[in-house]
Image: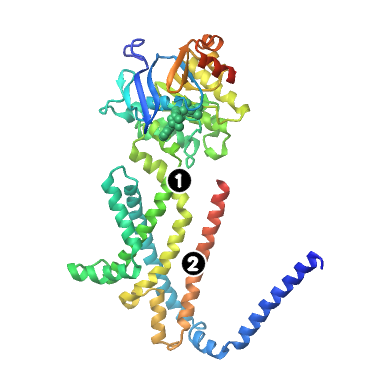
Amino acid sequence: MSTAAGQVPAIDIKDLHKYFGDNEVLKGIDFHVDDSQVVCVIGPSGSGKSTLLRCVNRLEEPTSGQIMVEGIDITDPETDLDQVRSRIGMVFQQFNLFPHMSVLQNLVIAQRHVKRRGKDEAVQVARRNLEKVGLADREGAYPAHLSGGQQQRVAIARALSMDPDMMLFDEPTSALDPELVGDVLEVMKDLASEGMTMMVVTHEMGFAREVGDKLVFMDGGVIVEEGDPAEVLANPQHRRTQSFLSKVL
Amino acid sequence: MKRSTRRRLTQAVLYAVLLGLVLLLALVADWDAIRANFFAPGGFDSAEAWKELFTVGVKNTLIYTAIAFFGGLALAVVLALMRLSPLGPYRWLATAYVELFRGLPALLVILFMAFGIPIAFQWTPPGGSVGAGVIGLVLIAGAYMAETLRAGIQAVPKGQTEAARSLGMSAGRTTVSIVLPQAFRIVIPPLTNEFVLLIKDTALLFVIGFLAEQRELTTLARDAVSSGPTAGTSTSYIQAAVLYLIITIPLTQLVSYLERRQRRSR
Ligand SMILES: Nc1ncnc2c1ncn2[C@@H]1O[C@H](COP(=O)(O)OP(=O)(O)OP(=O)(O)O)[C@@H](O)[C@H]1O
Ligand SMILES: [Mg+2]
């Protein structure tokens, strides 16, 4: 990034609360992600991991608190959300490819309408990203004809085609057959090594340990513990972290 | 008795009863009356009669159906989006419209459009009274298809909208490029059904009174009952019935096929 590199965090969350009706799902989250950092978020089901991630690009409306993305307050009503979202790639557990479009069209459509790129440029960018995820030969295929692992890699390529400054992953490998998980993690590793800022909700502790710069453990809507992944995994400080890790490791 | 023997016996009895009923009908039926009233000469055997039914009746029926269907569809898209709008007044307006036109007899709407409105406001409808009657069909079809489309839109997974929005696509762009194309695909079978219903509803336009070249199939058949070679018989009704079925049965079969295919791909 050209502006104030290293000074403004990529994502900076202050005292974030989120209610669904009377149910307080996020109970005051303070947390930041630095440029080029890979932050992994773990925690039991229902602890609010997805909600936290979805607040970062305002797929969920925060109830209170502040979320700054590269210094821009995205909770400010004056902020152009579409503009901010186009710079934050998001990858879903269920892939969410557009089933009525070919792989190439999936990668082109938002470039055309959001980035206002010409057709040739958009196709060129799309092909470059398909190559990156190892699916250059499948650009004409429809999502239904791809394996889950291939679909997820297309979804990553689709997000990358917007040239995002950061990527959010919500359990990107949880819906995959075990033998397909590796390819997707490999793509994510490559991204991390290229310096992409990443926030990853995952159950892949191996990935967190190897690729993550920071590990965050959430439970009951709060961050219980955060730190160096290897450290937290080997030496959890809190009882809740210990009991969670003893169940999943 | 063995079970298999008993089953075969039951089947034989059922077939025998059926055969008996058919024979009875054939014996009781007044074949001369049937031939004279439903298959009079100058009807089924007349190329001339078929030609008029086809080039005027079927043609106009299909034209009125097509206008009612595509006009209704355009209206339905607007109504369905209004019903899903975050703005209350839009939702209420669309709901009121849908309830109004689904709750009224089509015939009443057609009469009102063809005579009520033009007389009250000195309005000359495009295409005359027929045009106004077809607009009545558009208004009704729009209400029914709006409900179908709304269900289709709601059947598109939420993740599709979220993926599009997370790429920075606007709400409008997401609706047009992502949600509606998938919704339409889901509702092709029920929309085809609506098309079949409209084909039959164009017969209601009969009440308006047509110029000769504007007549749809039912009106044409009715006129052939009062004049022409088969006058005084119902031959032309039977001919019109055959023509309606030639159009509608393949369409309803297509609907079943599409529904089966959709169920399999789920
Ligand atoms: N749209 C919603 N409406 C109401 N409640 C919701 C909604 N989304 C999530 N919740 C609730 O918020 C809580 C946190 O959900 P969230 O999906 O963030 O958890 P999670 O940590 O991602 O869990 P998982 O590991 O199962 O994905 C849960 O109790 C869930 O039922
Ligand atoms: Mg989740």
Residue B40 image offset from top left, x and y in percent: 50, 87
User: Could you classify mark 2 by the number of other residues whose Cα lies within 10 Å: few (under 14), some (14-19), or many (20 or more)?
Assistant: some
| Left or right of B24 on screen, residue A104 | left
Q: Are marks 1 and 2 on the same chain?
A: yes
Q: Which residue is mark 1?
A: B155
Subunit under mark 1: B
Residue A48, quarter of the rendered image: top left
The N terminus of chain B: image quadrant: bottom right
What x and y, as percent, mark residue B194? Answer: 43, 61
Q: Where is residue B142, by image quadrant?
A: bottom left
Query: Which residue is tagged 2?
Result: B248
Whole-angstrom CA distance, mark 1 to mark 2, is 28 Å
**On what subunit does the disc labeled 2 rest?**
B
Taking depth in this image into account, of B17 and A39 the one nearest to the observer is B17
- Residue A223 x/y as whole percent: 43, 17
Q: Is mark 2 within 8 Å of ligand 1?
A: no
Q: Quadrant of ligand 1?
A: top left
